[in-house]
């Protein structure tokens, strides 16, 4: 093997190694601490190699990393769409790193430490605003169990946390690749350390805020078995009876509010009316607030609903799902547009369904309505995305300062507070199902900066990204000697 062949072999090995690291980052249950470091080797390689070498190495590594969720994507969408999603993720990562490389190797200045985080946040912001699935794959959600660092989302949302993650990676990569050749590099490193330490300190301080309010007992019931339009009467009755028994058991144990998962049945309108009457009577019989979610098919466009019944059996509110999962989009579900709030024991409760909580704008809309508790029926995909979906929902609570009760099928039953603390959690299961009883403090919503300003920081990063990209298109400044391309 000659020198050129060895060189290519080493580059392939480096790309594969970087791709394997990214798989642990892109996974639906990522290794949280690795997210801070995994992009570093790829950035270093891009900074040190020519643009042509960097392009194919980054593309190969990104493709290997993005393919980690192939099986999951295949569950929710057809193969051509799966390949398209993986290709788009690959191209996006290639673009982000090569665009960063262009500015870093041209200017070798301290301010280039911000290029990578700004571009990452800008891309994330645009995806959240423009794509039907939003930014559900944002690396910020990887920190879902790290409470001190999560608190930054109460200020700047997911954009603030993602910026910090990418900033640390960027600073490490510059320190390794440029060492002392980075002009005024100490400024870049000092700012990174200052922001990281300040964010952690803020998080610890915020987590020590006292929680005062009314003690409330929540019950969650979930049976993974689905009831479709063509389900037999015996099959449907068995599952319905399972819910009835679990609800009665939780009520007997003191549950005041009981939440059921998304689409426990898919029904024709006349049958849906019967089910509504059934659960109305059940709420009154057990004297509980009861949330129930069903799908309704009128033969034209299906809809996805959540009903909330009072302890007297009245229908307090109904909510139609806003954001559809890929299978629902294929089946042409009609989306809702209204928000639903009810007052329970002096506190405002809101309703949302599963994927709705992927969208920070919807979560903020409830924050602006001074919601204290969100009741969220959900249906995850074969347990694969249970942790990620639950933690994505938890972040909405931190951003807007409310408690969340989430009941999922094929996922997790979760109660989390306004600071993201998991107060109770357990997996769902098939018949006879799973139930969870949690006695927690319901407090007034915690005021947050994010509820007031929304994703202003993300859009500022979009503007800054445009400026960076325009600067990158300029001719090389005199006296700068970038690597050969």
Image (tube, grey):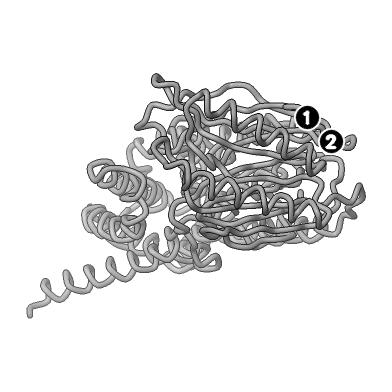
Q: Is residue 229 left or right of residue 371?
A: left
State the residue position of label 1. Answer: 342
Q: Quadrant of the N terminus?
A: bottom left
In the image, residue 177 above or below residue 183: below
Q: Position of residue 455 (x, y in %)?
A: 62, 35
Q: Is residue 456 visible?
A: no
State the residue position of label 2. Answer: 344
Q: CA distance from mark 2 to mark 1?
A: 6 Å
Q: Residue at x 49, y 50 (%)?
A: 380
Q: Is residue 469 visible?
A: yes
Q: Position of residue 244 (x, y in %)?
A: 66, 47
Mark 2 burial class by Cα count in 10 Å: few <14, some 14-19, many 20+: some
In the image, residue 433 above or below residue 176: above
Q: Position of residue 6 (x, y in %)?
A: 15, 76
Q: Position of residue 441 (x, y in %)?
A: 86, 52
Farthest-out residue, front:
234
Farthest-out residue, left:
1
User: Would you say the residues marked 2 and 1 are in contact, meaning their CB atoms lie under 8 Å apart?
Assistant: yes
């Amino acid at each position: 093997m000659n020198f050129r062949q060895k060189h290519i072999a080493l580059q392939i090995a480096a790309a594969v190694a970087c791709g394997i690291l990214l798989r642990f980052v892109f996974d639906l249950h990522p290794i949280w601490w690795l997210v801070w470091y995994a992009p570093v080797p790829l950035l270093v390689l891009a900074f040190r190699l020519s643009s042509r070498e960097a392009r194919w190495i980054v593309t190969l590594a990104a493709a290997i990393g993005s393919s980690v969720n192939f099986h999951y994507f295949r569950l929710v969408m057809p193969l051509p769409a799966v390949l398209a999603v993986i290709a788009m993720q690959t191209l996006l990562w290639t673009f982000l790193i090569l665009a960063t490389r262009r500015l870093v190797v041209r200017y070798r200045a301290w301010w280039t430490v911000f290029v990578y985080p700004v571009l990452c946040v800008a891309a994330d912001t645009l995806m959240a605003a423009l794509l039907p699935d939003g930014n559900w794959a944002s690396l910020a959600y990887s920190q879902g169990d790290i409470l001190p660092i999560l608190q930054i989302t109460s200020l700047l949302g997911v954009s603030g946390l993602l910026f910090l993650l990418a900033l640390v990676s960027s600073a490490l990569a510059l320190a390794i690749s440029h060492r002392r050749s980075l002009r005024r590099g100490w400024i870049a490193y000092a700012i990174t350390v200052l922001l990281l330490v300040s964010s952690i300190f803020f998080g610890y301080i915020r987590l020590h805020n006292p929680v005062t309010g009314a003690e409330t007992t929540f019950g969650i019931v979930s049976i993974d078995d689905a009831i479709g339009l063509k389900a037999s009467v015996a099959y449907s009755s068995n599952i319905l009876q399972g819910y009835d028994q679990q609800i009665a058991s939780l009520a007997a144990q003191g549950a005041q509010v009981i939440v059921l998962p998304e689409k426990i049945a898919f029904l024709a309108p006349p049958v849906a009316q019967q089910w509504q009457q059934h659960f109305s009577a059940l709420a009154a019989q057990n004297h509980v607030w009861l949330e129930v979610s069903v799908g309704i098919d009128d033969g034209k466009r299906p809809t996805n609903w959540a009903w909330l019944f009072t302890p007297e059996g009245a229908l307090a509110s109904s909510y139609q799902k806003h954001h559809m999962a890929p299978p629902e989009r294929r089946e042409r579900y009609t989306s809702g547009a209204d928000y639903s709030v009810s007052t329970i024991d002096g506190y405002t409760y809101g309703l949302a369904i599963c994927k709705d909580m992927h969208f920070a704008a919807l979560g903020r809309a409830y924050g602006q309505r001074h919601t204290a508790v969100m009741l969220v029926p959900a249906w995850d995909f074969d347990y694969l995305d249970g942790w990620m979906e639950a933690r994505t929902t938890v972040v909405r609570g931190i951003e807007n300062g409310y408690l969340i009760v989430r009941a999922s099928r094929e996922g997790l039953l979760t109660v989390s507070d306004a600071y993201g603390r998991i107060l109770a959690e357990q997996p769902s299961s098939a018949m006879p199902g799973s139930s969870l009883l949690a006695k927690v403090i319901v407090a007034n919503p915690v005021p947050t900066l994010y509820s007031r300003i929304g994703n202003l920081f993300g859009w500022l990063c979009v503007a800054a990204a445009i400026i960076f990209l325009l600067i990158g298109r300029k001719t090389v400044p005199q006296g700068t000697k970038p690597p050969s391309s």
